Amino acid sequence: MKVNRKHLPWVKAVFHLFALAPIIYLFLLVFADQAGGDPVQFIIHYTGIGALNTLLLTLLISPAAKKFKMSWLMQTRRLVGLYVFAYATLHVASYFSFDLLFEWSLLGEEVIKRPYILVGAVAYLILFALSVTSFKKVMAKMGHNWQKLHNWVYFAVILISIHFYWSVKSEIIEPSIYIFIGLLLVGLRFKKLTSKKAR
Amino acid sequence: MTNKRVFIKGILNKATWNTSDNEVTPEAVFKSRRQIIKTLGLGAVGASLSTNVNAGLIDLFGDSKPAEKFTIKPLDFSENQAFKISEQLTPETKVTSHNNFYEFGTSKSNPIENAQGLKVEPWTLTIDGEVDHPITLNYDDLYKIVALEERTYRLRCVEAWSMVIPWVGFSLADLIKKAAPNSKARYVAFETLYDPEQMPGQRNRFVGGGINYPYVEGLTLAEAMNDLSFLAVGLYGKTLPPQNGAPIRLVVPWKYGFKSIKSVVKIRLTDKKPPTSWNLLASHEYGFYANVNPNVDHPRWSQASERRIGAGGLFSAKRIPTLPFNGYGEQVANLYKGLDLRKNF
């Protein structure tokens, strides 16, 4: 597929639609009372897995662009990456508002006492740092430090997979698949990450 | 747990690790789209089409066969005033649509979607083991072996949500007494129906959350003989729906919800402590006793407080402090004298 500069806005629009559709679908589910007797756990889970899926997608962009020689794909990476942050924010916000009902002390206690929440919180802070530095101006200012910082995304995907694995009661098959995919996507960059240039 | 893959749909389905479309979108979600379309009034569009086209349209949304409907019937019972509480009841629709019943799937909405075809007639419940008079109950016996009464209990899930439910049933002790336990009886073991044909979670580890089925639970004989221990055959004045454990289930309100085993087929009195499903799966997280205890946290959920599922919508939930033994300490604390409840969690 050949995508030139003129097509890019359209491509991006399609990406926006794909990223927004599940959120709209979630709203419809909740308002149509189709998210179960207690939608709280449903919403938290839905947005959490949405964040993880989007993150895996982000990490797929550069290998896919290389493999299929679609350099335009790289232009969509920031867009998709920001949706990771959007989904993660919805996830954290729904946990804090619907489940903890805005109890700050409980949030603090839970983050400290529960390793899986701590791991998720650290991952969220990484995503936050990546998002606020995603603007071109900041990128230019940061120089090569920008890449250094953004390499933390590989750490985040591992943390988030572990967060998922730890958060479930007994069903380990699906989280295991996610950990495997996460490791695979990081593994693709193993050379780049261990070479001197990256540091 | 399966709901999470909704997001992948349409985006990742060309990736190599994904198998097929229908595996990506859980059937439940797929079906519920139809409900949304109905709710949004788009059903009218479908209805205006000719029958043939309409059938095709319904096919598209995943339920060409008529939905199986489980029949619930009204019950005859008396109210037991001793077990009435003043707390606001959780609405019936929430009690019957937010369930942990991994035999039908691990997400909360799976049981109501997947259990409606469960056959409960005929049903056999046996009470045997260390007893002088083993008993076999058939379906009809469940409702008349002991006079039915209604009791309102709090139900506290280990996941830190709770409900208030009016159960109909009878005291477990009454049934055990009829079987006449012998001097060797010290524990009571329970077993859920094992029927992989009817229970998708028992056919497939992915659906069933990796539990070894049949689901088993247990109590000490003293716990089982406590006045609170209850065998429920109904809720809200009617027979139990399958997602809530039809036709008969245990209710032990001072313990976490998973102790209250559903769709019971066997009650066996034993001299040894029986295995229990969640304890077998993760013994460091789930002990044999599983008494509600705000001072002993689960690795993933603080047990100090709980979210009460009440009458209102998303924003009206309440967090309330959790009480030792779920507030039933007066009736049961004496059962654990001399036992370190931090170790025996």
Image (cartoon, grey):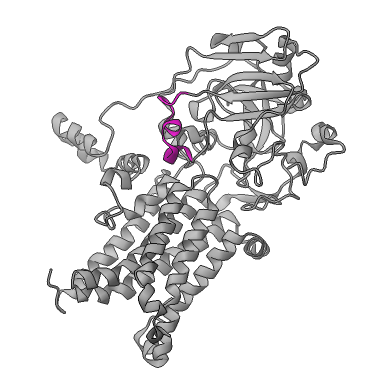
Q: Quadrant where the C terminus of chain A lies? A: bottom left
State the residue in front, A170 or A121.
A170
Is residue B108 rendered to the left or right of residue A177? right
State the residue in front, B131 or B233.
B131
Q: Residue at x 60, y 34 (%)?
A: B277
- Considering only vertical position in the picture, is A115 above or below B126? below
Asked which quadrant contains residue A87, the reply is bottom left
Instruction: Read off the magenta span.
Output: B195-209
Q: Residue at x 41, y 53 (%)?
A: A177
Asked which quadrant contains residue A57, the reply is bottom left
Is residue A178 rendered to the left or right of residue A70? right
Q: Residue at x 31, y 44 (%)?
A: B23
Check the image and name the residue furthest to the right: B338
Instruction: Provide residue B298's location: percent of width, then percent of height.
Output: 66, 50
Residue B206 lies in the magenta-colored region: yes
Residue B30 lies in the magenta-colored region: no
State the residue in front, B88 or B33.
B33
Instruction: Provide residue A18's location: percent of width, then percent of height.
Output: 28, 61
Check the image and name the residue furthest to the left: A2
Check the image and name the residue furthest to the top: B133
Instruction: Provide residue B259's location: percent of width, then percent of height.
Output: 64, 33
- How many marks can you see? 0
Q: Is residue B153 visible?
A: yes
Is residue B340 rendered to the left or right of residue B136? right
Q: Is residue B170 visible?
A: no
Q: Quadrant where the N terminus of chain A lies? A: bottom left
State the residue in front, B159 or B18.
B18
Instruction: Provide residue A66's location: percent of width, then percent of height.
Output: 23, 73
